[in-house]
């Protein structure tokens, strides 16, 4: 077993709402010696443990994915993607490619953010794709697979999403009446739980529903 002080984390989706905060938390943790980030654009900040790798999802070298613990915070919307095919590429194909290459390079833990309602049998395309990536990641036999299914995320987004802004206002107004698994959750709390759980030495498949972030 690799001592925790020598472990390497790799994160993809580090410029997103959860990913950006998770990257900061991983860098601040003494558990990891190095935090590698595959990103299309600079994060805009530096840290002694942070290694940014400019990346265009062309997977030119499988060594890019060499790390102990992998964190996938990729995700888009149907509107932004523009088509079902483009959405599936970001939310299914990219995570699966990363997971396969990293496993081949010796990664033993994979953490991914999917969504509340992820289900391969869902009538909704969004939830069905999330369910499919969960199912197929399990088939790669990672010693540890950690799946996070948050509800509506609260936080400062770099882009404006009208539907989510309306949803946030509704959820905040009726939050006391909403069951725990359906309440809106703070993106920073999701990042905090992900960072913590990655360091607990868990084995096997663990699914964390939205109530875990309350």
Image: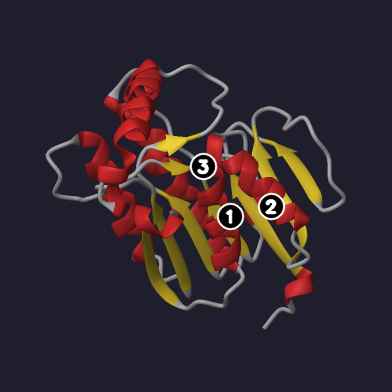
Q: Which residue is rendered at x = 46% and y = 53% of the image?
A: 112
Q: Which residue is mark 2?
A: 25
Mark 1 neighbour density, 10 Å: few (under 14) some (14–19) many (20 or more): some
Question: Nearest the camera: 127 or 63?
Answer: 127
> What SS does tag 1 mark?
helix
| Mark 2 surroundings: few (<14), some (14-19) or many (≥20) residues within 10 A | some
Local SS, label 2: helix
Residue to which mark 1 is pinned: 192
- Marking on residue 187: 3
Query: Is 115 placed above or below 3 here?
Result: above
Q: Is 199 rendered above or below residue 63?
A: below
In three-dimensional space, the C-alpha distance between marks 1 and 3, rounded to whole angstroms, equals 9 Å
Q: Is residue 56 left or right of residue 162?
A: right
So how many labels did they put on this image?
3
Q: For numbered disc 3, what is the local secondary structure?
A: helix
Image quadrant containing the C terminus: bottom left
Is residue 60 something that shows in the picture? no
Q: Earlier in the sequence, mark 3 or mark 2?
A: 2
Q: Earlier in the sequence, mark 2 or mark 1?
A: 2
> Does the rendering let one see residue 13?
yes
In this picture, is 145 found above or below 180? Answer: below
- Looking at the picture, does residue 65 appear above or below residue 88? below
Residue under the image location 33 percent in, 31 percent down: 173
């Amino acid at each position: 077993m690799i001592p925790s002080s020598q472990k390497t984390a790799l994160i993809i989706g580090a410029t997103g709402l959860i990913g950006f905060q998770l990257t900061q938390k991983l860098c601040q943790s003494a558990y990891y010696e190095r935090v590698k980030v595959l990103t299309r654009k600079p994060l805009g900040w530096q840290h002694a443990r942070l290694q940014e790798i400019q990346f265009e999802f062309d997977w030119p070298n499988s060594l890019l994915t060499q790390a102990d613990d992998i964190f996938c915070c990729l995700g888009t919307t149907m509107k932004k993607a523009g088509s079902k095919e483009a959405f599936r590429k970001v939310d299914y194909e990219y995570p699966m490619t990363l997971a396969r290459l990293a496993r081949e390079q010796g990664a033993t833990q994979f953490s991914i953010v999917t969504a509340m309602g992820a289900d391969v049998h869902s009538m909704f395309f969004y939830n069905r794709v999330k369910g499919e990536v969960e199912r197929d990641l399990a088939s790669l036999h990672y010693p540890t697979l950690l799946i996070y299914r948050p509800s509506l995320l609260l936080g400062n987004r770099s882009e404006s999403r009208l539907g989510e802004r309306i949803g946030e206002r509704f959820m905040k107004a009726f939050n006391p009446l909403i069951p725990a698994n359906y309440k809106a959750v703070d993106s920073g709390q999701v990042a905090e739980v992900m960072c913590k759980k990655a360091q607990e030495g868990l084995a096997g498949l663990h699914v964390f529903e939205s109530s875990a972030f309350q």
